[in-house]
Image (spheres, rainbow, N blue to C red):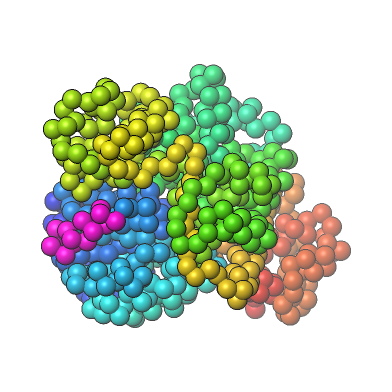
Amino acid sequence: MQAAREVLQRYWGYSAFRPAQEAVIQALLAGREVVALLPTGGGKSLCYQVPGLVLGGVTIVVSPLIALMRDQVEGLLRRGIPAAAIDSSLPTPLREKILHQAQAGQLSFLYVAPERVTTAAFLEKIQPLPVRLIAIDEAHCISQWGHDFRASYLRLAELRATFPQALWIALTATATPRVRQDILTYLQLQNPVVVQQPFYRPNFYYAVVHDIDKDKRLFQSLQKLHGSGIIYVSSRKRAQEVAEKLRRWGISAAFYHAGMPASARNETQAAWIREKIRVIVATSAFGMGIDKPNTRFVIHYDLAIEPEAYFQEVGRAGRDGELAYAVALLAPRDLEEVWNRLEEKYPPHEVLLRLYELLRQRGGIGAPFPINPTELTEQLHIKSYTLWRALHLLSQEGFLSWREGHTTRAYVRSRVAPEAWQKPITPLQGWIARLGGAALFTEGAYVDLLDWAYQLGIPYTQLYEEIERLRREGWLIHDALPPNFGEVLLQEPPPSPTQWETLRHKYRTLQQQARVRATFMLRYYQQTAVCRAQYLLRYFEELIEPCGQCDVCRGYYAPNRPTESEKMQAAAWLSEYAQVPRPPHELKEAILRLFPQKAEALLEGFLAEGRLELLPDWRLRWKK
């Protein structure tokens, strides 16, 4: 471990690891494979970055999130650690350059998207690499029982044949016991060490505020709470609207979402970390890689609909161990909105079929073609997010690949010598040469044009028109998308009827699991009888005593709680009636006849205490 501590001190400036990190790294350096289950803020990335440097060679990191890969690579490069990422959007010349660097021993970390890493062509190119460690990030994606299943994860074990000597580590922040078992099974981990930190955070105050007027309650909450915090919303538009409201109320606030230029996001994030801004109003895009230990509160203006997402988002507060607040604002309209959001996230199977057929009529198979998302949503009578989800799902199945309509990253390369750019026709042309740098005249530059436009103080449309003019006139080549357009490539051969039917069954399972998770969260927001922390941790099968400090434990809903006598009577009855597993609705109807006012509170309490157990088929049984 001495070598690991030296690496930690040299590159990160810390003298010691956290206990869970030390356990993970010690196991890897002893030649053991590892499953690391560390909640948000647990320092997962160090668990493979430090041993990767100690072991030497190349560490392959599989990650499903392009933004997270880029964030990790930028962080390593800032510390002087050679790293690069390959995802589906990276142009071929730059992919080849990165692979050449890896083969030449110039990279320590290679981040790869799961869809690419197991393709035959890619495996052939990386086979010569001295890979000593393979890290599977967001490992819960391998399980259909998880909240973000990705079919490409099921093929990752194929990497073992290419790199039989490499050690493996699987990492996730949120995994139920069933998901953990899927990680062990499908990754074929060899006698792994499982390192798990408890989900329970004793410094958290959980509360749900019920009111028809959310804005009033938001203002009151921010008046009572001290320090800086995060407000989570469900859309980019709402992020901007809520941030503007806060500023009108005299509260220092800014919005953050994935549609902003990278420079603007970085500036907003830095201002918040330095406490020049008190409140960030953000979509779920905010939080990856953020370490602000003194964040005092997380408020959900729009409700989280998955326990895993809720834990990750509230887990960004209170990392310094001091009291932190996790507050959800609940209005009557939210219940309907939750189900609407779920329908948008999981569009009907018929929409997937109609969308694929429409794309096939438009562009055929085997060659990329542009799409206008607005036209497609109008023709299919669906919302833009539903279209995004449908394309995402078809892409995961390998039926197509696509570039999003709001993608502004592009490959740009000059077709003329640098000298020709010394006398630009327009000032903007001169700025493009400066921003592109030396790479513009060699292998080409992969850049964010929206970020360029932000730095130049011009609309994206104007910048696109300029680079398109330069393309037509022979100055450069580029693959930028026109404003508000996307690009699709239908893969060959087209999916067979059997593949469509397989997708239908798989998709039905995903929808059912999503409804179960949403129902769990809705009950969390609505119930007033069980400790909030106790209720939430039940999802991960972690049993705790009541926290003593959430809104329920503090007695705000005391009149609705069952008495000890009622609990004893109900337990005696259930120990007989529920010896045989029964569906939840049947159990609830039966106990309603005995305790009309408190049936739900009794059931929730017994579940939280572990006296009623939830079986894999979603029936309930009294635990002897």
Would you say residue 248 is visible in this rendering? yes
Q: Residue at x 26, y 76 (%)?
A: 163
| Stretch of the chain drawn in magenta | 92-106
Above or below, comparing residue 207 to residue 366 in the picture: above
Name the chief secondary structure element in magenta: helix
Q: Quadrant of residue 349?
A: bottom right
Residue 96 in magenta stretch? yes
> Split into 4 quadrants, where in the image is the C terminus?
bottom right
Percent x, y of residue 398:
48, 65
Percent x, y of residue 246:
53, 24
Residue 304 in magenta stretch? no
> Split into 4 quadrants, where in the image is the N terminus?
bottom left
Q: Residue at x 36, y 45 (%)?
A: 479
Residue 203 horizontal side relative to residue 275, left or right: right
Percent x, y of residue 232:
52, 40
Residue reaching furthest to the right: 593
Residue 169 horizontal side relative to residue 178, left or right: left
Q: Residue at x 56, y 28 (%)?
A: 241
Would you say residue 174 is visible in this rendering? no
Q: Residue at x 53, y 55 (%)?
A: 363
Residue 584 horizontal side relative to residue 11, left or right: right
Q: Nearer the viewer, residue 576 or 418?
A: 418
Q: Nearer the viewer, residue 471 or 448?
A: 471
Percent x, y of residue 401:
46, 58
The count of marks equals 0
